[in-house]
Amino acid sequence: MKRQKRDKMTRAHAKGYQAGILGRAKENCPFQACETRSEWLGGWREAVQDRISTFGMR
């Protein structure tokens, strides 16, 4: 069975999350289109919140 590619929005969100977890700046968003950029930034924000809650509890 072939693996289907994830849709562009899901990939953008996942890539933004990865960037946020790694501590990269949101200005490094590789997307120019409004919708995909918004998804990337949403993932980035989610990761930053996760990092704060994880590391802030120490």
Image: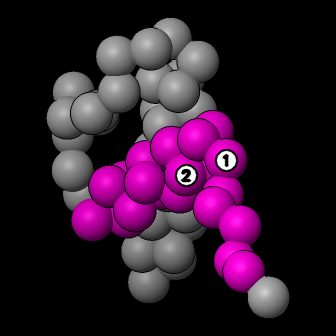
Q: Is residue 34 visible?
A: yes
Give, as a three-letter code, the residue at label 1: Asp
Give, as a three-letter code, the residue at label 2: Arg
* Residue 28: % across, % down: 20, 35
Position of residue 18 in the picture relative to residue 1 (left or right): left
Q: Quadrant of the N terminus?
A: bottom right
Q: Is residue 49 visible?
A: no
Q: Nearer the viewer, residue 54 or 3?
A: 3
Say whether marks 1 and 2 touch (CB < 8 Å): yes
Q: Nearer the viewer, residue 19 or 30?
A: 30
Q: Which mark is residue 11?
A: 2
Q: Which mark is residue 22?
A: none
* Residue 58: % across, % down: 44, 84
Main secondary structure type of the part rendered in magenta = helix
Nearer the observer: mark 1 or 2; the answer is: 1
Query: Please, which residue is most extreme toward the top here?
Result: 34
What residue is rendered at 43% in x and 54% in y?
Answer: 15
Q: Secondary structure at mark 1?
A: loop
What residue is rendered at 58% in x and 18% in y?
Answer: 35
What residue is rendered at 55% in x and 52% in y?
Answer: 11
Please give the range of residues in magenta.
2-22
Position of residue 12 in the picture relative to residue 9 (left or right): left
Work out whether 22 lies above or below 33. Answer: below
Q: Secondary structure at mark 2?
A: helix
Query: Please, which residue is most extreme toward the right here?
Result: 1
- Residue 16 lies in the magenta-colored region: yes
What separation in Å lies between label 1 and label 2 (alpha carbons)? 6 Å
Query: Which residue in the protein does label 1 denote?
Result: 7
Q: Nearer the viewer, residue 58 or 39?
A: 39
Position of residue 17 in the picture relative to residue 24 (left or right): right
* Residue 38: % across, % down: 54, 23
